[in-house]
């Protein structure tokens, strides 16, 4: 399994906002903390606002904050919302499948089972667990170092 950069950035953004729950965070800060493109983050933010995960606050002291509790956001739910599809192989999508052995192939079942196990494991983790106070200090130290180095 490999997640898209879009999902990766969404997970990173939500984690950052969960750790900084006490304030509105400028998107530029998140971009610099991770060393990723602000333009990419803007697209991620748009989807997360639409999904009511992130709230965008306008104005001079505007930025981003979580729109719901980190306890209510499971990693599996977030991945399902940010991945364009979870088709591990071509035959998972009957509209585009051209595999000649699809009607009798046993691999499809095993791969579907693996995908479901993957998502079930992610469903057991919440953003709150990943952003727990005991984990704040190491995360903040790494982000602070990146911010001090100009986001690189």
Image (tube, helix red, strand yellow):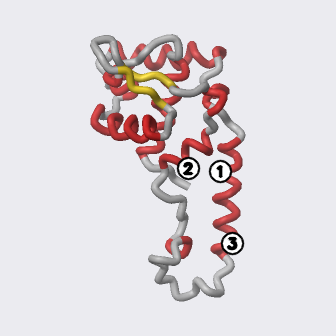
Q: Between residue 56 and residue 34, name the one nearer to us.
A: 56
Taking the image as drawn, is residue 147 in sight? yes
> Mark 2 and mark 3 in contact (Cβ < 8 Å)?
no
The x and y percentages for residue 14 are 50, 30
The x and y percentages for residue 77 are 60, 44
Taking the image as drawn, is residue 9 in sight? no
The x and y percentages for residue 11 are 51, 36
> From the viewer's perspective, is the residue at label 2 or at label 1 nearer?
2
Q: Determine the image quadrant of residue 72.
A: top right
Seen in the picture, residue 91 relative to 124 is either above or below; the reply is below
Seen in the picture, residue 50 relative to 4 is either above or below; the reply is above
Q: Quadrant of the N terminus?
A: bottom right
Q: Look at 46% across and 12% down and name the residue there.
A: 23
Q: Look at 35% across and 35% down and name the residue there.
A: 41
Tell me the number on the disc at residue 80: 2
Left or right: where 33 falls relative to 16: left
Q: Look at 44% across and 49% down and name the residue there.
A: 4
Q: Look at 55% across and 42% down and name the residue there.
A: 78
Tell me the number on the disc at residue 119: 1
Mark 3 or mark 2: name the one nearer the start of the chain.
2
Q: Quadrant of the C terminus?
A: top left
Q: Residues within 10 Å of mark 3 (few under 14, many from 20)?
A: few
State how many labels appear: 3
> Mark 1 and mark 2 in contact (Cβ < 8 Å)?
yes
Q: Which residue is mark 3?
A: 109
Q: Between residue 82 and residue 105, name the one nearer to us.
A: 82
């Amino acid at each position: 399994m490999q997640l898209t950069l879009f999902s990766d950035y969404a997970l990173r953004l939500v984690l950052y906002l969960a750790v900084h729950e006490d304030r509105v965070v400028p998107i530029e800060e998140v971009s610099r903390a991770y060393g990723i493109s602000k333009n990419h983050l803007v697209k991620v933010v748009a989807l997360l606002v639409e999904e009511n995960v992130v709230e965008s606050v306008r104005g001079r002291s505007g930025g981003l904050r979580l729109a719901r509790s980190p306890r209510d956001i499971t990693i599996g739910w977030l991945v399902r919302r940010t991945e364009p599809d979870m088709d591990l192989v071509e035959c998972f999508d009957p509209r585009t499948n051209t595999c000649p052995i699809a009607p009798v192939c046993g691999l499809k079942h095993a791969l579907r089972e693996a995908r479901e196990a993957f998502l079930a494991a992610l469903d057991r983790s919440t953003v709150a667990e990943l952003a727990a106070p005991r984990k704040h200090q190491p995360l903040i130290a790494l982000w602070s170092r990146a911010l001090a180095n100009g986001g690189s």
